[in-house]
Image (cartoon, helix red, strand yellow):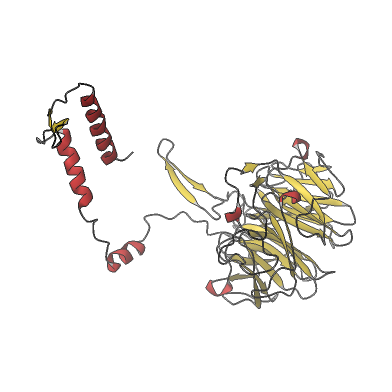
Amino acid sequence: MKPRQWILMISLVLCLSVAVGALPQNGQLGPDGNGQTILMAASAPGSLMALVEGAQAGAATDPPPRPSEAERAAVANRPPIRTIHDARHVFAAIDIDPIRGELVAGDENNFSIVVYDRMTNTPPTAAFSEPRRVIQGENTFLEYVCGIYIDPESGDIYAINNDTLNWMTVWGRDAQGNVAPKRKLATPHTTVRMSIDEATQEIFMTVQDDHAVSVFRKSAEDEESPVRLIQGSATRLADPHGIAVDSSAGLIFVTNWGTVADRHYDTDAPTTLNRGEGKANWPVGREANIPGSGRNEPPSITVYRKDAQGNVAPLQVIQGPNTLLNWPTDIAVHPERGEIFVANDTGHTVTVYSADADGNAAPIRVLQGPNSLINHPVGVKLDLTNDELWVANLGSHSATVYDITAEGDPTPTRVIRSGPADSRGPMLANVHTITYDTRREEILGGN
């Protein structure tokens, strides 16, 4: 309660006390104009009524003048005293080009795409791995890059932004520097990962906040609408992140963090500007949430036919304590082996399941431990040509490589790093809030 409100409340209490016979110290009882007895409060300096009168007088004064444009500009341009920033590349998403021998990483921290030689193996004493090229700058339409795909035929690079710039950008394989993309496609806000079905020439995208999967034509651009949408309470989608297509089996696999809220999914649900108003198959936005329905469900993997659309139930749901799923952020499928690989961010694990697993199924293999160098893994990709498993580690500025059958605490066969071997990633990606812990003298950032 504000001080002025406290003063008025206290005066009201004193008035009520008079009605039952109590006399305030700085006031007297007297008649009003109608002959009724009321409180006649003194306005001596320091008295309660003097404070009330002062508060009422202050309420009638005009607010202070708005700062001038020059004063506002001076504040906006004021340099920081100190800056906390990770200048190194952060591997938030990766894909492998075995034909051209390249690893392509999406850097969510520095808004860039970084390309390395696939066979790079950074010595422990080296400061970092030298990239072949970097795409970065204001002309690129890149921000919070969290999804990467390489066209196996052309070598084109597809990149997804998770926030602020709602675009998927497409680049020629030799693009570098501060250049514009070949084309771009408007995507739903908080699109986080993608997988492309080359057989049907379709792009499958997970939409984090809207608990949806949007499907576009692979060649879509500009403001083109999706061709299909998976969304609704029956889908069991809950903060979906990773997605993988098994074209031969006709299935898509989606990892869910578990944060979800019920939502009005009827056709009249409200939409907001820049969230697909007037577009077909556009996800119903967060403004249609039902208040009080938010909850955290256990993380899961949900499986659908790749031609599924609408409010469709999954064919399989891998969920439960035996699964060891823990913020499952990315997923890859090995069709020939019938296996799915999952990067668990906060579990520091890569878990492997049978592709037909269902329910509270335990993984058939787990990669975890100090020798593995797996640290906040947020990306997992399979090089089916060379039988290699790649992991992007947000916590250690690295991409690590293993044999496709690795398990336990394996030593990587190669390591690509953007920083020293002993450097820890501050993981300052998409920071929403900052506060300071005075007792521990620590800065806390919410990502």
Q: Is residue 229 above or below residue 172?
A: above
Where residue 64 appears, as percent x and y from the top left, is 23, 57
Where residue 57 appears, as percent x and y from the top left, is 18, 47
Is 15 left, or right, of 390 in this rendering?
Answer: left
- Residue at the limit of the structure toward the front, as seen here: 34
Q: Residue at x 22, y 56 (%)?
A: 62
Instruction: Looking at the picture, tell me which residue is in the foreground, 158 or 289.
Output: 289
Instruction: Looking at the picture, tell me which residue is in the foreground, 440 or 298.
Output: 298
Where residue 370 appears, as percent x and y from the top left, is 69, 42
Q: Does residue 379 appear anywhere in the picture?
A: no
- Residue at the limit of the structure toward the left, as seen here: 44
Quadrant containing the N terminus in the rendered view? top left
Q: Is residue 413 above or below residue 218?
A: above
Q: Residue at x 81, y 42 (%)?
A: 363
Instruction: Looking at the picture, tell me which residue is in the foreground, 61 or 150.
Output: 61
Is 273 left, or right, of 66 in this rendering?
Answer: right
Q: Residue at x 75, y 71 (%)?
A: 217
Is 376 left, or right, of 39 in this rendering?
Answer: right
Question: Which quarter of the picture shows residue 20?
Answer: top left
Where residue 385 appears, as percent x and y from the top left, is 85, 63
